Image (spheres, rainbow, N blue to C red):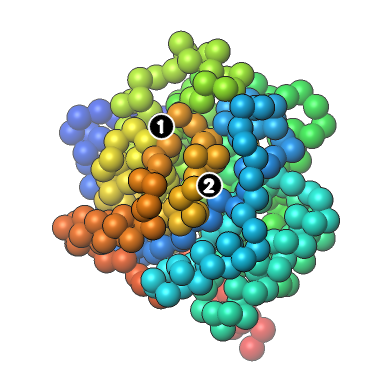
């Protein structure tokens, strides 16, 4: 189901403060309770490789950042991480990587997808987040068993997109939107998302972002505050940024409004929230999110995947178990539960599949 809110309504709601903002959060919490309940689904995030052929101006692992040591998890390391997640009760994993289109990379992802499905008897859901690829690649990975694909549009404003990317045929807004369309046509549960609080970004553009997600009818969303990284061109514009606290509050409002607009999709409480405030993820869950993506990448690789400043890193020997226990406790205090061993497909997607099946009968 979709609720209609005009752009003017959204702009007004994104600008709310104090009691009015509180009322927005309460409304979103109620919509969430009625439509997706109090379960929180796990996506174990595996940062497969920080090699990227692109040069987005905001991203810490962009191709031109030569201060980075580039890595790629071996196939065995990846599968061990997947199996550990499966044993701990993760119903899904997310394989995320910088963008790479080589035949070796495509075959590597394909193998991970197939072996994950085989080794878990189909029990573990797979979300891919490996950037723009051609239709054939999307199809190949889908036919091998990938369930979902997350490709963030980052902003629905073409003018702002141009400010965030190099001006060449490799980084176009149109290409990004076409890739999202191709994912939907292939049959994936499609996710996108935006950065909130970018330099040059306006409240009007954020309202448009919400309407864009509603219009392309996404199944899931991962969005969070923009956090600057010193080794990126966009860092030069940090004087134009809102204070971190304001970016955080704006992010919560975006989550709440998206839940009201699209009440049955999956919305992730992203890690970028936590970089600003240790409890920000839980607050996002309270106002509409229903998915968390604990980072399960082997800890020695994680310093290589710093997309932005202050990204939370684990202690040297942390295997993520502590994080899950403490998350479980904090969610319990909010009357939420972790849905262990459940893939947690988007309810919107499930309804679509059901209606397609009943039309055929
Ligand atoms: S945002 Fe994605 S595509 Fe752009 S440089 Fe970073 S990893 Fe590469």
> Between 150 and 33, which is closer to the camera in this rendering?
150
Say which residue appears at 48% left-offset and 15% top-offset.
Answer: 238
Q: CA distance from mark 1 to mark 2?
A: 16 Å
User: Is 274 left or right of 286, judged from the image as shown?
Assistant: right
Looking at the image, tell me whether mark 1 or mark 2 is earlier in sequence order: 2
> What residue lies at 39% left-to-right and 64% top-to-bottom?
41
Measured as percent of width and height from the top left, residue 300 is found at 49, 48
Q: Residue at x 76, y 58 (%)?
A: 106
Which residue appears farthest toward the bottom when viewing the image? 361
- The answer to whether 294 appears left or right of 110 in the picture is left
**Residue 256 coordinates in the image, percent (x, y):** 35, 45
Q: Residues within 10 Å of mark 2 (few under 14, many from 20)?
A: some
Instruction: Answer with left or right where residue 174 lies relative to residue 44.
Output: right
Q: Which residue is mark 2?
A: 301
Percent x, y of residue 168 = 80, 27
Q: Quadrant of residue 18?
A: top left
Q: Nearer the viewer, residue 154 or 233?
A: 233
From the viewer's perspective, tell me whether residue 310 is left or right of residue 231: left
| SS class, disc 2 | helix
Q: Is mark 2 within 8 Å of ligand 1?
A: no
Label 1 vs label 2, nearer the camera: 2
Q: Quadrant of residue 57?
A: top right
| Pointer 1 residue | 310
């Amino acid at each position: 189901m979709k609720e209609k809110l005009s752009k003017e309504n959204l702009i007004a709601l994104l600008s709310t403060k104090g009691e009015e903002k509180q009322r927005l959060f309460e409304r979103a919490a109620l919509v969430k309770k009625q439509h997706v309940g109090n379960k929180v689904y796990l996506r174990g995030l595996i940062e497969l490789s920080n090699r990227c052929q692109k040069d987005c101006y905001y991203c810490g692992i962009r191709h031109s950042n030569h201060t980075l040591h580039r890595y790629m998890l071996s196939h065995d390391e990846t599968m061990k991480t997947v199996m550990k997640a499966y044993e701990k009760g993760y119903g899904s994993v997310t394989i995320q990587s910088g963008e790479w289109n080589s035949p070796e990379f495509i075959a590597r992802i394909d193998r991970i997808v197939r072996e994950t499905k085989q080794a878990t008897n189909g029990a573990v859901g797979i979300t891919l987040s490996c950037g723009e690829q051609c239709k054939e690649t999307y199809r190949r990975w889908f036919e091998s068993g990938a369930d979902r694909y997350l490709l963030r549009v980052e902003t629905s404003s073409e003018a702002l997109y141009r400010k965030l990317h190099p001006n060449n045929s490799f980084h176009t807004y149109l290409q990004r939107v076409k890739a999202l369309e191709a994912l939907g046509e292939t049959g994936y549960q499609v996710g996108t998302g935006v950065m909130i609080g970018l330099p040059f970004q306006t409240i009007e553009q954020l309202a448009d972002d919400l309407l864009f997600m509603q219009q392309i009818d996404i199944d899931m969303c991962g969005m969070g505050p923009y956090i600057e990284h010193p080794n990126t061109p966009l860092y030069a514009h940090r004087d134009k940024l809102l204070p971190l606290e304001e970016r955080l509050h704006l992010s919560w409002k975006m989550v709440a409004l998206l839940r009201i607009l699209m009440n049955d999709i999956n919305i992730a409480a992203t890690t970028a929230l936590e970089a600003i405030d240790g409890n920000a993820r839980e607050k996002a869950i309270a106002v509409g999110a229903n998915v968390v993506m604990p980072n399960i990448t082997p800890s020695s690789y994680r310093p290589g995947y710093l997309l932005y400043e202050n990204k939370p890193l684990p202690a040297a020997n942390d295997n993520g178990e502590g994080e899950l226990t403490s998350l479980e406790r904090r969610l319990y205090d909010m009357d939420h539960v972790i849905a262990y061993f459940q893939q947690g497909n988007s309810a919107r997607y499930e309804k679509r599949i059901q209606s397609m099946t009943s039309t055929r009968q």
